[in-house]
Image (spheres, rainbow, N blue to C red):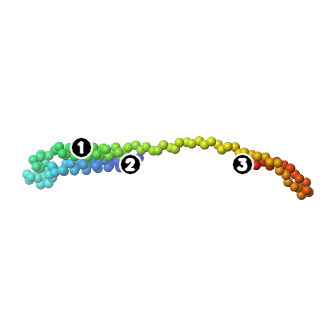
C-alpha cells in the first residue's frame, strides 16, 4: 500500500518536474554565454526572463495531465460481487418397496420373509 503510494508520488513529481523544466527551456531562457557577454539567461528574442503565455499553457497542461494521471492511478478498485447463494431443494426421500420372499433350507423346509428394497 505504502509502496504503491510512493511510486505514484514519485511518478507524478517526475512528470511535473519534466514538464516544468521543458516549458522553462522552451527557447526563452537562453543559458550559457548570453547576447550581452554574461552567463545566465533572460535575454533572447526580446524576452526578458520569466514565464510567457506559451510556457504557462504548456506547464498547466503538463501539471493537469499529471493530476489526471494520478487520479486515474488512484481510482478505487471495484471487485465483482460474489455469486448469489443458491439453495437447492433436498433430494426426495427414498422410495422403499417390500416383497414377500422365500428360500429353501438345507433340510427341505421353506422359510418365508419380507425383503425391503429402496430406490
Ranked by sequence position, the earlier of labels 2 and 3 is 2
User: In what element is the residue under mark 2?
Assistant: helix
Q: Is residue 101 left or right of residue 39?
A: right
Q: Nearer the viewer, residue 77 or 80?
A: 80
The CA distance from mark 2 to mark 3 is 61 Å
Q: Residue 10 has which mark? A: none
Q: Residues within 10 Å of mark 1 (few under 14, many from 20)?
A: some
The CA distance from mark 1 to mark 3 is 79 Å
Q: Which residue is mark 2?
A: 4
Q: Which residue is mark 3?
A: 119
Q: Is residue 109 left or right of residue 82?
A: right
Q: Is residue 62 left or right of residue 35?
A: right
Q: Residues within 10 Å of mark 3 (few under 14, many from 20)?
A: few
The CA distance from mark 2 to mark 1 is 26 Å
Ranked by sequence position, the earlier of labels 2 and 1 is 2
Q: Name which residue lies at 45% across and 44% down.
A: 79
Q: Which residue is mark 1?
A: 60
Q: Name which residue lies at 85% across and 52% down.
A: 102
Amino acid at each position: 500500500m505504502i509502496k504503491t503510494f510512493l511510486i505514484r508520488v514519485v511518478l507524478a513529481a517526475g512528470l511535473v518536474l519534466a514538464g516544468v523544466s521543458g516549458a522553462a527551456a522552451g527557447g526563452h531562457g537562453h543559458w550559457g554565454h548570453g547576447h550581452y557577454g554574461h552567463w545566465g539567461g533572460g535575454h533572447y528574442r526580446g524576452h526578458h526572463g520569466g514565464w510567457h503565455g506559451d510556457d504557462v499553457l504548456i506547464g498547466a497542461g503538463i501539471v493537469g495531465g499529471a493530476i489526471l494521471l494520478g487520479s486515474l492511478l488512484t481510482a478505487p478498485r471495484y471487485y465483482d460481487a460474489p455469486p448469489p447463494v443458491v439453495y437447492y431443494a433436498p433430494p426426495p426421500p427414498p422410495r422403499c418397496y417390500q416383497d414377500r420372499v422365500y428360500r429353501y433350507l438345507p433340510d427341505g423346509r421353506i422359510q418365508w420373509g419380507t425383503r425391503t428394497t429402496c430406490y
